[in-house]
Amino acid sequence: MPIRTASARWQGNLTEGSGRIRTGKGGYEGNYSFKSRFEEGEGTNPEELIGAAHAGCFSMAFSKGLADAGFTPDSVETTAKVHLDKTDAGFTITRIDLETVGQVPGIDEAEFLKIAEGAKANCPISRLLSPGAEITLNAQLA
């Protein structure tokens, strides 16, 4: 399997500095700052990128689980809400709420939810993050 890379460059001090994040093959490049991370400033932040990775990974794992069960999804759309909280140990990602809507012809809701829970437990990003953060799932069949 290939090794994936990303890079970041930060200039200046924590609160007044700024940086740029880039994925290895250039699929994404964006600015980040103290304000975009801890306030409501423009740009991205590491938590949003973790959320994007988790939403993408879950959506693919869910689609695979559906296909393995004999269902071809028209679409799976997932949002990941990453909670960054201040704890005794410092700022920590404490929870990620996955919200997904799937358009899957021919599946009943119980089977849909069972496969969604399996994807939540087994996608590589969930497995990475779940020892340290609670992961919740709200799955809806469209």
Image: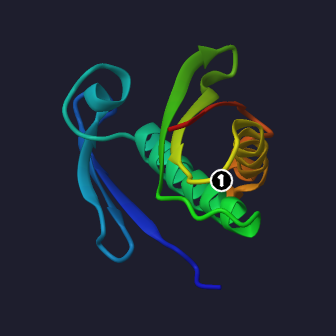
Nearest the viewer among 15 and 102 is 102
Does 33 sit left or right of 108 as displayed?
A: left
* View extreme (bottom): residue: 1
Which corner quadrant of the image does residue 123 belong to? bottom right
The location of residue 19, given as percent across then percent down, is: 26, 48
Nearest the viewer among 141 and 56 is: 141
Q: Residues within 10 Å of mark 1 (few under 14, many from 20)?
A: some
The residue labelled by disc 1 is 125
Query: For the point 43% across and 47% down, which residue is it?
Result: 49
Which residue is painted at 59% across and 84% down in the image? 2
Q: Quadrant of the N terminus?
A: bottom right
- Image coords of residue 136 (percent x, y): 68, 29
Of all residues shown, which one is farthest toward the left?
Answer: 42
- Left or right: where 122 falls relative to 12: right
Q: Give the residue at x 23% y 41%.
A: 18
Element type at mark 1: helix
Could you tell me if residue 27 is visible in this image? yes
116 relative to 121 in the view: left or right: left
Q: Quadrant of residue 3?
A: bottom right
Q: Is residue 129 above or below residue 59?
A: above
Q: Position of residue 13 (x, y in %)?
A: 30, 35
Number of numbered labels in the structure image: 1
Q: Amino acid at mark 1?
A: Ile
| 132 left or right of 98 in image | right
Q: Is residue 122 above or below residue 113?
A: below
